[in-house]
Image (cartoon, rainbow, N blue to C red):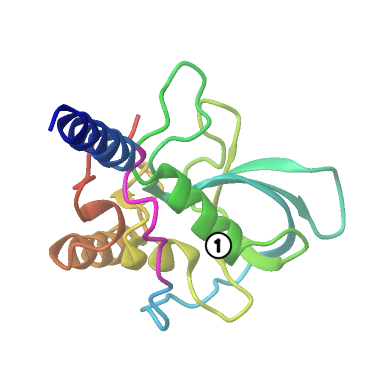
Amino acid sequence: MRRRQQLLAAGLVVTAVLVGHQLTKGPGARPAVDPGPVPSPAVPVGAFAARIDRVVDGDTFLATVAGGGGPVRVRVIGVDTPETVKPGVAVRCYGPQASAFTKHLLPAGTIVEAAHETGGDVDRYGRQLWDVWLPDGRFLESVLAAAGTARAYPYPPQTRHAALIRSLADAARAGRRGLWAPPCRGQSFS
């Protein structure tokens, strides 16, 4: 009888460790799902082509503008994804999935269309602020918000598409997609 109790106790400990590990990692087995067609504004006059060099995390990447210069660090306008690489900040719930989803959408070598909004094109960290259109014509910010990998986060004065992004993020939240699903449910991003 004693051996049986020891085995049962050991089994409970292993189960508790596995459940605790899964909760701290977030919904690791549930990757982001591409929402397919999403409302996307037209690419504006004056947009430029850029090649994706490397995705840093869910809302930041390195790119090279066609026709000149070296790589630039880019922050996507209007969305915020959970942190994965910010110094001094723990990896946030659903951050790895958000980063993986952006890497899926923007593999190295992808050519995108991009544009700056009026009112400043660089954030306080020196990253260029871009609106981005994928090769299939979809607006990157719409895809990220609709998939539930990003929250709406307007950067005044770059707010041209804020209402669209907000509506898609609200729909993802209502549908409990991505970071809005248990166990994350929109926990702290930074």
Q: Position of residue 2 (x, y in %)?
A: 15, 27
Q: Is residue 139 above or below residue 68?
A: below
145 or 15, which is in the foreground? 15
User: Which residues lie in the magenta part?
Assistant: 25-33
**Residue found at the far front of this picture:** 1
Q: Is residue 115 above or below residue 146?
A: above
Main secondary structure along the magenta-highlighted residues: loop
- Which residue: 74% across, 58% down? 108
- Which residue: 23% across, 35% down? 16
Q: Residues within 10 Å of mark 1 (few under 14, many from 20)?
A: many
Q: The residue under label 1 is which amino acid type? A: Val
Residue at which label 1 appears: 132
Please state, as top left, top right, bottom left or bottom right, where the N terminus lies in the image. top left
Q: Is residue 85 above or below residue 57?
A: above
Queried whether the magenta region covers residue 30, the answer comes back as yes
Location of residue 39 (image quadrant): bottom left
Please state, as top left, top right, bottom left or bottom right, where the C terminus lies in the image. top left
Q: Is residue 133 visible?
A: yes
Count of numbered labels shown in the rendering: 1
Q: Position of residue 183 (x, y in %)?
A: 21, 46
For residue 170, side relative to residue 58 (left or right): left
Q: Is residue 47 visible?
A: no
Location of residue 104 (image quadrant): bottom right
Location of residue 115 (image quadrant): bottom right
44 or 3, which is in the foreground? 3
- Which residue: 42% across, 21% down? 89
Queried whether the magenta region covers residue 28, the answer comes back as yes
